Image: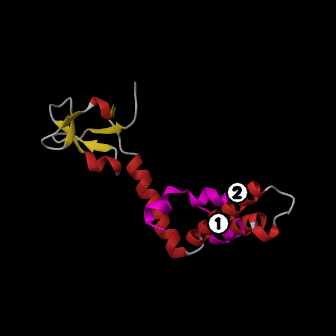
């Protein structure tokens, strides 16, 4: 599993825990959920769909414990979470729909004029990774929204 996939899921919420919980508290929450959702502990009078959902829940709980139960992987996960929170907390000056930007075919990029006279330039391949773009002449940042807006 890549680090990208690890941070996409909030493993603390899977266990019903908080980042400030101790290892003992995390372990206790994991054990309680693992017993509740373990496939061998399920009643046989549930539907196969519910049985499958609970099996996936057990796998998710196990993955959360695999990451949060080890001090080293927990520390790495916490750093990635903080990094993600910091990235999302950048002050965004404006939200711009991709359709509002101009596509420059020769340069193969989108651009949008900034109020300072500079430009926000976004290369199409980069838009899959990030939607935040800095102006090329000031410190303003826009967020590019993709999809239909009209």
Of the numbered discs 1 and 2, the one sitting upstream in the chain is 2
Instruction: Indicate whether 29 appears above or below 101.
Output: below
Which disc number belongs to residue 59?
A: 1
Q: Which residues are magenta?
A: 1-29
Disc 2: which residue? 53
* Residue 8 rendering spot, x and y as whole percentages: 49, 56
Is residue 67 visible in the rendered image? The answer is yes
Residue 23 magenta-highlighted: yes
Residue that protrudes farthest toward the left in the picture = 106
Is residue 18 visible in the rendered image? The answer is no
Left or right, 95 with respect to 62, comes to left
Residue 59 magenta-highlighted: no
Which disc number belongs to residue 77?
A: none
Q: Which secondary structure lies at badge 1?
A: helix
Label 1 crowding class (10 Å Cα cut-off): few <14, some 14-19, many 20+? some
Question: Which image quarter: residue 116?
Answer: top left
Are the two marked residues, 1 and 2, in contact with CB atoms closer than 8 angstroms?
Answer: no
* Residue 124 rendering spot, x and y as whole percentages: 26, 45
Which residue occupies 54% across, 57% down? 9
Which residue occupies 73% across, 67% down? 34
Question: Which image quarter: residue 112?
Answer: top left
Query: 108 or 131, which is in the foreground?
Result: 108
Label 2 crowding class (10 Å Cα cut-off): few <14, some 14-19, many 20+? few
Split into 4 quadrants, where in the image is the C terminus? top left
* Residue 80 rendering spot, x and y as whole percentages: 44, 61
Q: Which secondary structure lies at badge 2?
A: helix
């Amino acid at each position: 599993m890549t680090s990208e996939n690890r941070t996409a899921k909030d493993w603390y919420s899977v266990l019903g825990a908080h980042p400030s919980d101790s290892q003992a508290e995390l372990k206790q929450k994991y054990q309680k959920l693992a017993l509740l959702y373990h496939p061998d502990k399920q009643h046989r009078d549930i539907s196969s769909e519910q049985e499958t959902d609970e099996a996936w829940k057990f796998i998710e709980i196990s993955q959360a414990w695999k990451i949060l139960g080890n001090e080293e992987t927990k520390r790495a996960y916490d750093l990635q979470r903080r990094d993600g929170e910091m990235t999302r907390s950048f002050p965004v000056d404006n939200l711009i729909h991709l359709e509002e930007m101009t596509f420059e075919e020769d340069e193969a990029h989108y651009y949008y004029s900034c109020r300072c006279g500079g430009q926000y330039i976004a290369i199409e391949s980069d838009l899959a990774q990030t939607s935040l773009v800095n102006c090329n002449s000031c410190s303003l940042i826009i967020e590019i929204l993709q999809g239909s807006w009209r």
